[in-house]
Image (spheres, rainbow, N blue to C red):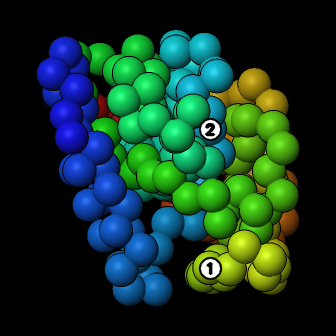
Amino acid sequence: MSDGRNGLSLDQMLADNDAVARASKEAQPRFIAFASLSMPPASLRQLMREVGGSGGIVVFRGFPQNSSKAFLAGLGKAIDKGQRLSGVGIDPRLFRAFAIEAVPTYVVVSTDFRPCDGFTCQTVVPPHDRMAGNVTPSYALRTFAQGGGPGAAIAKIYLASLEKLERQ
């Protein structure tokens, strides 16, 4: 399914999400930004650009009003024409695993993990750094990298990727 106005493709986004899920343990993103279409479009645009550019993933809980069209329309307001979405997915399991109640929330995990698939199961999340609030992804990564917490070393890797992208 594609949104003709901005070229967004739900099929491509779901295929990208599946590719992330099938990736080897070494390739699984450890920088996760939890987002919602209720965020201001400019904030969401920056979040998707920076997190995707660093190699992390932006995760949404699901479709608003259970409508893929509403989801694509909301995303369309937050991206530039022709912009390719990379590292954007839908995964309510991650929201449940990290008990996310506010967006944006940034998480850098110290090791790979897999969220459980059941509705009542509880994922044991690895040690991680977490920050919620209206801050940029670069600020969150910088804070994690300098903080010496469980995700500091991983945050430095994502921060280096983001800084390289910004210099281009």
Label annotation for residue 117: 1
Residue 34, x across and y down, in percent: 65, 45
Which residue is found at the position 45% from the left and 35% from the top?
67
- Image quadrant of residue 163? top left
- The answer to whether one can see residue 21 in this image is yes
Going by the numbered disc 1, the residue's amino acid type is: Asp
Evaluate if marks 1 and 2 touch, with contact meaning CB atoms under 8 Å apart. no
Question: Residue 83 — which label?
Answer: none
Q: Quadrant of the N terminus?
A: top left
**Residue 78, horizontal then vertical, whole percent:** 43, 19
User: Quick check: 106 left or right of 77?
Assistant: right
Nearer the viewer's eye, disc 1 or disc 2?
Answer: 1
Q: Residues within 10 Å of mark 1 (few under 14, many from 20)?
A: few
Residue found at the very far bottom of the displayed protein: 25
Tell me the number on the disc at residue 35: 2
Q: Secondary structure at mark 2?
A: strand
Q: Residue at x 80, y 77 (%)?
A: 120
Alpha-carbon distance for marks 1 and 2? Answer: 20 Å
* Viewer-closest of 110 and 116: 116
Q: Residue at x 28, y 44 (%)?
A: 10
The location of residue 80, given as percent across then percent down, is: 29, 17
Going by the numbered disc 2, the residue's amino acid type is: Ala
| Residue 160 appears in the figure | no
Image coordinates for residue 110, horizontal then vertical, percent? 69, 75
